[in-house]
Amino acid sequence: MKKIFTFVIALAITLQMANAQNSDWKNDTKVSVLFGLTQPIFASGFNIEGNFIHKRLIFDYSHGASLDFDGELVTDELQRQGVAVKVPYTTGFGLGYRIREWVNLRVEPKWHRNEYYYEGETQNEANLIAADNTFSLGLGLYGFYQPFRQQDNFLKGITVNPSVRFWPVVSSSFEDDQFSYINKNTGGPEVLKTLDPGVGFTPWVINLGVGYTFDFK
């Protein structure tokens, strides 16, 4: 994760230094389809995002699916309990403002579902320990870069989309944000706590998306 964070920061600095794109970006009308790389690399899952850009405003919808977390990808407490986390979906939208052509800030409400299983067991309804539906609300800082936009061919639409987001959970279906149960690994009472949707189940989400942009200018 440190490598991803370093890459995102380095890319943002590079984009700022290389900001020689056309000054008429404030009149853009574009549609982008992007795919997140963090989800398939670290969680064996999938993420797709659609953006509609009109002048300085940007609207997005994103959906992640089938994210798996176990071993070192879960918290120390969940490792101690021998519990893995399945995220069948994480979904929501964003409304943003383009500070520059290559960077925008968004407000983002998101919905998530977390399912808890004993590590190594088949993840089905019979083996489900508990499930938690959460809602997060936060901000996202996004880069938006078309490295070949000056080309007059299909390469023009290729888009790189780094992002750093802060999505704290503001509501949970767990009563008092926790679930008590008897853990068969430890043989005693344990507690599952509501998880944030980011790196290490913190509110911080770091991702790098790649995709294609269609320009309707």
Image: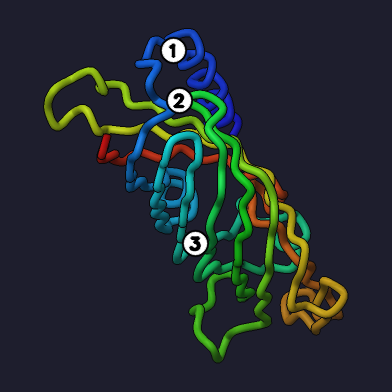
Residue under pointer 1: 19
Distance from disc 1 to disc 3, alpha carbons, whole Å, reads 35 Å
Instruction: Name the amino acid, label 2.
Output: Glu
| Circle 1 SS class | loop
Instruction: Name the amino acid, label 1.
Output: Asn
Q: Name above or below for residue 109 compared with residue 120.
A: above
Residue at the spot 29% in from the left edge and 39% down from the top edge = 213
Q: In this rendered view, identify the residue nearer to me: 159 or 3.
A: 159
Instruction: Compare marks 1 and 3 and give the one earlier in the sequence.
Output: 1
Residue under pointer 3: 67
Q: Name above or below for residue 20 compared with residue 24.
A: above
In the picture, residue 131 is in which quadrant?
Answer: bottom right
Instruction: Name the amino acid, label 3.
Output: Leu
| Residue 133 - label | none
Mark 3, residues whose alpha carbon is within 10 Å: few (<14), some, or many (≥20)?
A: many
Mark 1, residues whose alpha carbon is within 10 Å: few (<14), some, or many (≥20)?
A: few
Q: Are marks 1 and 2 in contact (CB under 8 Å)?
A: yes
Residue 66 location, x and y as percent? Answer: 45, 66
Distance from disc 3 to disc 2, alpha carbons, whole Å, reads 32 Å
Instruction: Compare marks 3 and 2 and give the one earlier in the sequence.
Output: 3
Mark 1 against mark 3, which lies toward the viewer?
1
Residue 146 location, x and y as percent? Answer: 33, 26
Residue under pointer 2: 101
| Circle 2 SS class | loop
Q: Are marks 3 and 2 in contact (CB under 8 Å)?
A: no
Instruction: Compare marks 1 and 2 and give the one earlier in the sequence.
Output: 1
Q: Are marks 1 and 3 in contact (CB under 8 Å)?
A: no
In the picture, residue 37 is in which quadrant?
Answer: top left
Distance from disc 1 to disc 2, alpha carbons, whole Å, reads 9 Å
| Circle 3 SS class | strand
